[in-house]
C-alpha cells in the first residue's frame, strides 16, 4: 500500500473516523434545518452536497431516496423557482437521469442567466454523457487555470482519463493533491481513489500494484470509503489474496452497497466457502434489484457489471448496459454494452453497437485506445464463438 | 453566523471554520477573564473537533495611539497564546470520547475531556477550560441588513472552546489593561510536502462579521470577494502592501451601510477613521473595566468620537452584536435597529462554561406503503385535508378553506388534535401540514404524498418534530403507530401492490 506519508500533502488531515462522524452529524443537522425552513437559501444546497459525499464515499445507497424526498418537499415550498430547478437538476443528475437534469437546468436560469453552480453542473452532465467533450475540456482547463483548486482539478483529471490521456490525467490528479490546502480527508481520499481507478481499470495495460497502492492510500485516509474497499478487494481477489479481500469488505457491509456483498461472495467462493458465498451472492442480487427498481439509471452500469460478472445473467447484463448506453453514450458505455451483447450471444446487436460506437467516437484520439478499435467485422463472430 | 463559511477555503473541514470569538469578565468570578472561540457552524449533535487543527486564542496588549479621526489601537509584540489540540476518538465504556490539551501562555498544559461540562482546571485555579458542543449564541435576525427575519441560527449548535483565567496573574493589567484578542485555526503541523508550505492558518476572527458584513458587503455590486485573501492574513500584522486594498473596501462598505436607510449619518472623514480602526481587526477589551452585554465596541466608538471609553468593551455571550453594529454603521447610533428576534436560541449562562447547553435535533419519522390502485384513486381518498380515511380518527372537522385551513381531529380514544394545512399541490398529489395543538410536540411538520408506482401507487408520509415535555421515544412510537395503522387501513381498502 502507499503509505499516507508517501503522498506529498501540504497539510495534515483530520482523522477519517472523525471526519465521517462529523459529516454524518452535520448531515443530520442540515436535514433538520431543511425540514424547518425548506426555502432558506443555502440549506437545501448544503444537504445535497453532504448527501453527495455520503453516497460517493460511504456508499450509502439510501441517499437518492432521501434526496428525492428533499426535492419533493422543496418543490412544495418553492415550486417553479430557478433555485428549486437547479437543485432538482443536481439530484436527478446524481441519479444519472441526465435528460431530466438538463430539463431542470433549462429552468434554472434566472434573469441573469445561469449561476456558476448551474454552469458547473452543465459541464458535469456533458462530461458524464460524453457530449461536447472538446468544449468541456476547454472549460475545465479554464477553471483549473483560474482557481487551481482540487475541486477544479479532479474533474479535469477525470476528463483526461475519459479522453484516454492517461499520463495527463495522472499529472492533473497529482497536482490536485499538491494544491490541496485543507484539513478534510474526503477530497484527498477521493483523488487517491481516482488514481486507483486510472491505473487499475482505465489504462489499457492495467498496473494493478500501482492501483492497489492508491486504493490503499484512499482507505488509509478514509477507512469508511466503501468503493475504495470494494475495488481493492477485487484486486486482492484477482491475485489470490482472498482473506485480505474479505477483511476489507466485512467492515463495509453495513453500508448497504450490494457491490460489497458481490465481492465478498467472490472472495468466499474462491476460498471454497460456497454456502456462505451463495448467501452473499443472493443478497447482492436482491440488493441490486432493489436499487434498480428504485433508481434504474443510477445503478444500470453497476448492475450490468454485476450480471456480466459473477451475477451470471448475461441477458440482464446486456439489458442494463444498453440502458446505460442510451442514457450516457460514453466510449466506456459503448465498450461495455458491446461486451455484454457478445456475452449474451447477440452478435447482431453487438455489431450495431460497434458501428454506432465507431460512428460517434471513431474519429477521436480516445478511440485509438479503445478495445473497440481492434474489433474487425469478424470480431463479433470470433469473440462470441464457442 | 459571525464568521461562518466565509470563504472557499473554509468549505473543506467545517471543524476548522471559526464562527465567533468572545472576551468577557467571568460571571462566576469578577477577578477572572473568559475567552471563548466557537468553530463548526451548524454542528450536529455528535460533532467533535478535528485532530489535525490547532485552535488558538491569542491576545496582545494594545496601546491607544490616537483618538477622533486619528483613532488608532496599536498592538504590542508580546503574545498570550492559548492553544487547544484534540485527539482521536477513543472507545470508553461503550461510547467514544475525545480528549484535548490546552497549552497556556506560560507553557502549562491542561488535559480535558470534550463535552465534560466541568471542564478541567489547573491545581492552582489559574486556568480552566471547557471544549464541546453548545447552543450557538449568535443572533442573526436580518437578511441583507434590511429585512427582519427570525433568528437564522435558531436551534443551531457549535463546538465551543471556553478558557477562563485569573486576570491579574496571567495578564497583569497594571502594565496596561487594554488588550486585543483574535482566534485562529491553523494546521497542526506541516504536511510531508517538501516543496509547498502549508497555509499559515485556515481561518481567523477578531471582531464579529469583519468578513461577511464589511469586507464582503452584499450591497457592493461587482466587487471581488476579498474574504479568502483576508483569512490568509496574519492577525495583528496585515501585509502592508494589502492594507490600501482592505482599507478602501472598508471605506466603500461602510459608506454603503450608512446609506442603507437613505440617510447619510457619517461624514467621509468619519468613515475613513472607522475603516482604519476596523483594519486593525481584533476584539478589544479592557481587563480593568466592567464588560457587559452592551459594552461591545464601546471602546472603539468612544475613541472615534474623541472621548474616553467607559467600559471594558469585549463581547459577552449574549451581546447582540449584529444589531449593535448595524445601528452604528447604518445610522451612527441615532436609532437602535433590532432584527426580527431579540434573543438567540438560548441565552448564555452565569455558570461555567457560560455558553448554553446544546439543542436537540429535530426528529424525523417516515414510512410508506405501495397500493394496488392508481394514484388518482388513492389521492381522491387521502388527498382531501378533511378526509376521514384513517382508522384511528373518530371525527374530523374543517375550519376555513385552502391553505391555512385547520382540521380538528377527534381520535377514537378521545384525543383532540388540531392541524393546519401549510401547502398543497393537487397535480403532484402532495400536501404539507403542521400541528397546532394536542400532540405534545413543537415544530411538528408532516408531508403526505401519493406517487405512481408500477401499476399502482406509493403513499409516503413523513413527519418531523421536537418532543415537548415528553420523551422523544414515546412521540416517535405514537407517530410510527399512527402511520402503520393508517397504511394498514389503506391496504385493506385498495389492496397491496404485488
Image (cartoon, coloured by chain):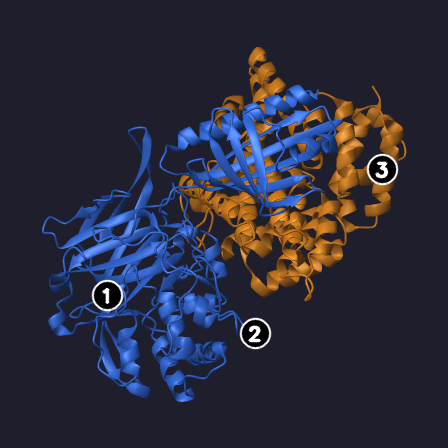
Instruction: State whether residue B67 is above or below residue B384.
Output: below
| Residue A197 visible in the picture | no
Say which chain tag 2 marks.
B
From mark 2 to mark 1, how far is it between C-alphas?
37 Å
Residue where numbered disc 3 is placed: A354
Residue where numbered disc 2 is placed: B221
Residue A181 spot, x, y in % from top left: 46, 56
Per the rendering, the mark at residue B208 is: none
Q: For mark 3, give the secondary structure.
A: helix
Residue at x-position 44% and y-position 59%:
B195
| Left or right, B149 with reference to A119 | left
- Chain A drawn colour: orange
Residue at x-position 14% and y-position 57%:
B29
| Circle nearer the viewer, 2 or 1 | 1
Q: Residues within 10 Å of mark 1 (few under 14, many from 20)?
A: some
Instruction: State whether residue A82 is above or below residue B89.
Output: below
| Circle nearer the viewer, 3 or 1 | 1
| Left or right, B157 with reference to B113 | right
* Quadrant for the N terminus of chain B in the image: bottom left
Q: For mark 2, give the secondary structure.
A: loop
Residue where numbered disc 1 is placed: B292
Q: For mark 1, give the secondary structure.
A: loop
- Which lettered chain is shown in blue? B
Q: Residues within 10 Å of mark 3 (few under 14, many from 20)?
A: many
Instruction: State whether residue A261 is above or below residue B89.
Output: above
Residue at x-position 52% and y-position 50%:
A37
Amino acid at each position: 500500500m502507499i503509505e499516507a506519508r508517501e503522498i506529498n500533502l501540504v497539510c495534515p488531515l483530520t482523522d477519517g473516523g472523525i471526519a465521517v462522524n462529523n459529516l454524518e452529524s452535520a448531515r443530520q443537522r442540515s436535514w433538520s434545518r431543511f425540514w424547518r425552513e425548506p426555502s432558506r437559501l443555502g440549506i437545501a444546497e448544503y444537504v445535497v452536497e453532504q448527501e453527495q459525499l455520503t453516497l460517493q464515499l460511504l456508499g450509502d445507497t439510501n441517499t437518492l431516496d432521501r434526496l428525492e424526498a428533499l426535492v419533493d418537499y422543496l418543490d412544495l415550498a418553492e415550486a417553479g423557482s430557478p433555485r428549486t430547478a437547479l437543485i432538482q437538476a443536481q439530484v436527478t443528475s446524481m441519479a444519472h437521469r441526465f435528460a431530466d437534469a438538463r430539463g431542470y437546468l433549462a429552468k434554472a436560469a434566472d434573469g441573469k442567466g445561469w449561476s456558476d453552480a448551474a454552469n458547473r453542473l452543465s459541464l458535469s452532465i456533458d462530461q458524464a454523457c460524453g457530449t461536447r467533450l472538446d468544449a468541456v475540456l476547454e472549460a475545465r482547463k479554464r477553471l483549473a487555470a483560474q482557481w487551481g483548486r482540487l475541486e477544479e482539478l479532479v474533474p479535469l483529471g477525470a476528463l483526461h482519463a475519459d479522453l484516454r490521456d492517461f499520463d495527463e490525467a495522472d499529472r492533473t490528479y497529482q497536482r490536485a493533491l499538491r494544491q490541496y490546502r485543507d484539513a478534510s480527508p474526503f477530497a484527498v481520499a477521493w483523488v487517491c481513489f481516482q488514481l486507483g481507478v486510472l491505473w487499475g481499470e482505465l489504462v489499457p495495460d492495467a498496473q494493478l500494484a500501482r492501483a492497489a497502492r492508491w486504493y490503499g492510500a484512499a482507505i488509509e485516509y478514509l477507512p469508511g470509503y466503501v468503493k475504495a474497499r470494494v475495488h481493492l478487494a477485487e484486486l486482492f481477489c484477482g491475485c489470490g489474496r482472498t482473506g485480505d479481500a474479505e477483511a476489507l469488505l466485512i467492515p463495509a457491509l453495513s453500508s448497504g452497497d450490494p457491490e460489497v456483498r458481490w465481492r465478498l461472495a467472490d472472495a468466499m467462493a474462491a476460498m471454497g466457502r460456497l454456502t456462505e458465498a451463495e448467501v452473499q451472492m443472493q443478497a447482492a442480487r436482491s440488493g441490486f434489484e432493489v436499487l434498480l427498481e428504485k433508481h434504474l439509471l443510477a445503478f444500470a452500469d453497476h448492475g450490468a457489471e454485476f450480471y456480466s460478472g459473477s451475477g451470471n445473467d448475461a441477458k440482464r447484463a446486456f439489458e442494463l448496459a444498453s440502458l446505460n448506453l442510451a442514457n450516457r453514450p460514453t466510449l466506456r458505455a459503448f465498450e461495455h454494452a458491446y461486451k455484454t451483447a457478445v456475452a449474451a450471444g447477440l452478435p447482431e446487436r453487438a455489431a450495431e453497437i460497434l458501428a454506432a460506437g465507431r460512428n460517434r467516437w471513431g474519429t477521436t484520439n480516445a478511440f485509438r485506445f479503445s478495445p473497440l478499435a481492434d474489433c474487425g467485422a469478424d470480431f463479433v463472430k470470433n469473440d462470441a464463438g464457442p | 453566523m459571525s464568521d461562518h463559511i466565509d470563504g472557499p477555503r473554509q468549505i473543506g473541514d467545517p471543524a476548522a471554520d471559526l464562527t465567533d470569538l468572545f472576551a468577557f469578565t467571568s460571571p462566576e468570578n469578577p477577578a477572572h477573564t473568559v475567552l471563548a472561540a466557537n468553530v463548526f457552524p451548524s454542528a450536529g449533535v455528535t460533532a467533535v473537533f478535528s485532530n489535525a487543527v490547532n485552535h488558538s486564542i491569542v491576545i496582545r496588549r494594545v496601546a491607544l495611539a490616537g483618538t477622533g479621526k486619528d483613532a488608532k489601537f496599536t498592538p504590542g509584540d508580546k503574545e498570550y497564546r492559548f492553544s487547544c489540540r484534540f485527539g482521536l476518538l477513543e472507545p470508553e465504556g461503550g461510547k467514544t470520547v475525545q480528549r484535548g490539551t490546552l497549552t497556556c501562555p506560560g507553557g502549562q498544559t491542561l488535559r480535558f475531556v470534550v463535552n465534560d461540562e466541568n471542564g478541567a482546571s489547573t491545581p492552582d485555579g489559574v486556568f480552566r477550560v471547557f471544549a464541546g458542543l453548545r447552543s450557538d449564541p449568535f443572533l442573526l435576525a436580518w437578511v441583507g441588513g434590511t429585512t427582519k427575519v427570525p433568528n437564522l441560527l435558531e436551534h443551531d449548535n457549535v463546538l465551543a472552546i471556553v478558557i477562563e483565567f485569573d486576570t491579574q496573574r496571567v495578564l497583569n493589567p497594571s502594565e496596561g489593561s487594554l488588550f486585543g484578542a483574535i482566534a485562529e485555526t491553523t494546521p497542526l503541523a506541516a504536511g510531508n510536502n517538501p516543496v509547498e508550505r502549508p497555509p499559515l492558518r485556515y481561518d481567523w476572527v477578531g471582531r464579529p462579521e469583519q468578513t461577511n458584513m464589511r469586507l464582503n458587503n452584499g450591497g457592493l455590486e461587482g466587487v471581488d470577494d476579498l474574504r479568502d485573501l483576508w483569512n490568509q492574513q496574519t492577525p495583528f500584522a496585515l501585509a502592508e502592501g494589502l492594507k490600501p486594498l482592505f482599507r478602501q473596501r472598508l471605506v466603500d462598505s461602510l459608506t454603503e451601510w450608512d446609506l442603507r436607510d437613505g440617510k447619510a449619518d457619517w461624514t467621509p472623514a468619519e468613515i475613513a477613521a472607522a475603516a482604519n480602526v476596523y483594519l486593525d481587526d481584533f476584539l478589544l477589551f479592557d481587563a480593568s473595566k466592567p464588560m457587559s452585554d452592551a459594552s461591545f465596541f464601546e471602546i472603539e466608538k468612544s475613541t472615534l468620537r474623541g472621548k474616553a471609553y467607559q467600559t471594558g468593551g469585549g463581547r459577552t455571550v449574549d451581546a447582540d452584536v449584529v444589531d449593535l453594529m448595524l445601528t452604528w454603521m447604518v445610522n451612527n447610533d441615532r436609532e437602535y435597529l433590532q432584527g426580527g428576534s431579540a434573543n438567540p436560541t438560548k441565552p448564555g449562562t452565569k455558570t461555567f462554561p457560560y455558553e448554553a447547553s446544546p439543542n436537540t435535533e429535530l426528529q424525523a419519522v417516515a414510512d410508506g406503503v405501495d397500493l394496488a390502485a392508481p394514484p388518482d384513486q388513492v389521492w381522491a381518498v387521502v388527498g382531501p385535508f378533511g378526509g376521514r380515511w384513517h382508522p384511528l380518527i373518530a371525527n374530523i372537522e374543517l375550519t376555513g378553506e385552502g391553505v391555512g385551513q385547520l382540521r380538528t381531529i377527534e381520535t377514537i380514544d378521545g384525543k383532540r388534535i388540531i392541524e393546519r394545512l401549510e401547502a398543497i399541490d393537487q397535480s403532484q398529489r402532495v400536501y404539507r401540514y403542521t400541528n397546532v395543538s394536542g400532540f405534545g410536540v413543537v415544530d411538528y411538520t408532516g408531508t403526505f404524498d401519493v406517487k405512481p408506482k408500477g401499476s399502482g401507487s406509493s403513499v409516503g408520509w413523513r413527519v418531523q418534530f421536537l418532543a415537548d415535555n415528553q420523551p422523544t421515544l414515546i412521540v416517535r412510537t405514537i407517530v410510527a403507530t399512527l402511520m402503520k395503522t393508517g397504511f394498514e387501513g389503506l391496504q385493506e381498502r385498495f389492496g397491496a401492490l404485488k
